[in-house]
């Protein structure tokens, strides 16, 4: 699959995957364990011969995937990774060579029906919050499977951080019509689909 399904602003903004890797914040083990617990992943039967499977969409350079891999070390959970931007996949493979990364978008998930137990999107769901991706996610999940979304949110209790968002970043997003998690549009799409419930910390 080509990068045609990638939002133009995402592809342009992520041209330098190495820069992305350097400046993007990582995730705490606590946040990853919290998400896994909500998804019911730690409670699998260790005697089962069938491993649980997690698909991470939009992995980028693997910031979240590395902590996820650490959290699941020694378990039977299999991590599947996907990223439609070539430069991101290349950087991912350098960082996490033992996890194969697939080339597909959230709107065209190249996996069979009912083939994964959970889908995770870290810092990216707002890029593909649409009916097609939601239908695809539901299609590949086993009955009772779950969707987990996580973002690194900036702390608006710090005055200069809130001011930077309000006066610089948000106007920039609006002017360039760039999807962002703070707009809340992704919540509307998810709620309107009535396919997944919303649970936040």
Image: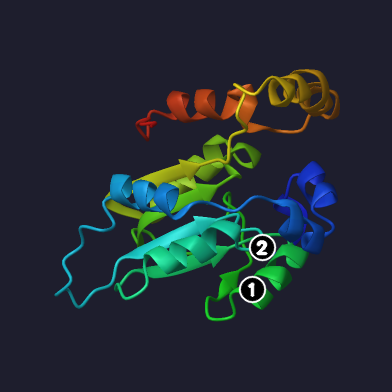
At x 81%, y 18%, the residue is: 167
Q: Can you say whether 17 is above or below 185 in the image? A: below
Find the residue positioned furthest to the bottom.
98
Q: Is residue 112 visible?
A: no
Query: What element does badge 2 sit on?
Result: loop
- Tell me: 75 left or right of 175: left
Q: Quarter of the image holding residue 183?
A: top right
Residue 75 image point, x, y percent: 30, 72
Viewer-nearest residue: 56 or 61: 61
Identify the residue at horizontal 46%, vertical 51% (top origin). 120
Of labels 1 and 2, earlier in sequence is 2
Closer-to-camera residue (79/190) = 79
Cα separation, mark 1 vs mark 2, equals 7 Å
Is any atom of residue 199 visible in this view? yes
- Quadrant (top left, top right, bottom left, bottom right) of the N terminus: bottom right
Which residue is drawn at the image coordinates 85% and 49% (left, top)? 12
Q: Quadrant of residue 83?
A: bottom right
Image mark count:
2
Residue shown at 20%/57% (left/top)? 43
Give the quarter of the figure containing the C terminus: top left
Q: Along the line of sight, which residue is nearer the eye, 76 or 142?
A: 76
Residue for badge 1: 95
Q: Position of residue 149 (x, y in %)?
A: 47, 42
Q: Is residue 104 left or right of residue 190?
A: right
Q: Which mark is residue 155?
A: none
Where is residue 17 drawn, in percent x and y?
78, 61
**Residue carrying label 2:** 61
Local SS, label 1: helix
Q: Residues within 10 Å of mark 1 (few under 14, many from 20)?
A: some
Question: In screen coordinates, is 95 left or right of 122?
Answer: right
For the residues bearing labels 1 and 2, Cβ distance under 8 angstroms: yes
Instruction: Characterize the local packing of mark 2: few (<14), some (14-19) or many (20 or more) Cα atoms within 10 angstroms.
Output: many
């Amino acid at each position: 699959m080509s990068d045609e399904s990638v939002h133009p602003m995402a592809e342009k903004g992520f041209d330098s995957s190495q820069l992305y890797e350097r400046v993007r914040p990582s995730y705490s083990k606590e946040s990853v364990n919290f998400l896994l617990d909500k998804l019911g992943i730690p409670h699998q039967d260790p005697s089962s011969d069938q491993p649980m499977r997690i698909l991470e969409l939009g992995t980028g350079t693997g910031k979240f995937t590395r902590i996820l891999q650490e959290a699941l070390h020694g378990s039977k959970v299999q991590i599947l990774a996907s990223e439609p931007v070539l430069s991101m996949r290349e950087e991912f493979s350098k960082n996490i060579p033992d996890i194969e990364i697939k080339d597909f978008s959230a709107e065209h998930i190249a996996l069979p029906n009912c083939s994964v137990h959970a889908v995770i999107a870290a810092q990216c769901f707002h890029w593909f919050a649409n009916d097609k991706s939601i239908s695809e996610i539901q299609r590949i999940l086993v009955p009772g499977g779950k969707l987990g979304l996580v973002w690194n949110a900036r702390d608006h209790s710090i005055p200069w951080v809130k001011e930077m968002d309000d006066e610089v970043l948000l106007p920039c997003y609006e002017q360039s019509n760039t999807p962002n998690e703070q707009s809340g549009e992704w919540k509307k799409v998810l709620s309107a689909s009535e396919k997944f419930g919303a649970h936040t910390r």
